Image (cartoon, rainbow, N blue to C red):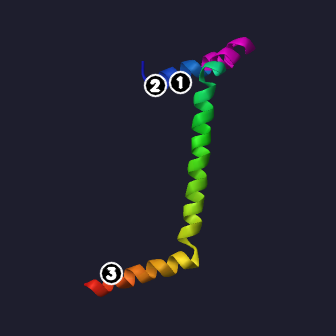
Amino acid sequence: MKTAAKREKLHDFVDSAYDLQVKAIYGKIEDYITRKSSDSIIKMKKMDVMKQALNHPLFLAERKEVKDDFDAIK
């Protein structure tokens, strides 16, 4: 069975499942979901910091200095 079919079956099952069944399924995968979510949040925060750093005047000046030094070697 392909992944898309599995997703559809799981989605259909969860949509029509009793509360107890949903709690049981969620309990089995809760750690994975929580870990994956927190990893994604950390990655997004790191990316935001990197984006801010890339546009910071000190970084831009340092980058220009490094480029000038590199160009001087040629």
- Looking at the image, residue 58 lies above or below residue 10: below
Q: Residue furthest left?
A: 74
- Looking at the image, residue 38 lies above or below residue 72: above
Give the image location of residue 35, x and y in percent.
59, 35
SS for dot 2: helix
Q: Residues within 10 Å of mark 2 (few under 14, many from 20)?
A: few
| Residue at the (50%, 20%) spot, across then down | 6
At label 1, the amino acid type is: Arg
SS for dot 1: helix
Q: Residues within 10 Å of mark 3 (few under 14, many from 20)?
A: few
The magenta segment is: 12-25
Q: Mark 2 points at which residue?
A: 3
| Residue at the (55%, 22%) spot, across then down | 8
Quadrant of the image containing the C terminus: bottom left
Frontmost of labels 3 and 1 is 3
At label 3, the amino acid type is: Phe
| Residue at the (57%, 55%) spot, across then down | 46
Residue nearest the viewer, comparing 22 with 62: 62
Q: Name the residue under label 1.
A: 7
Residue 18 in sight: no
SS for dot 3: helix
Q: Mark 3 points at which residue?
A: 70
Residue 72 in sight: yes
The first of marks 3 and 2 along the sequence is: 2
Gap between marks 2 and 1 measured at Cα = 6 Å
Gap between marks 3 and 1 measured at Cα = 52 Å
| Residue at the (61%, 38%) spot, across then down | 37
At label 2, the amino acid type is: Thr
User: Splitting the image into 4 quarters, where does residue 10 fall?
Assistant: top right
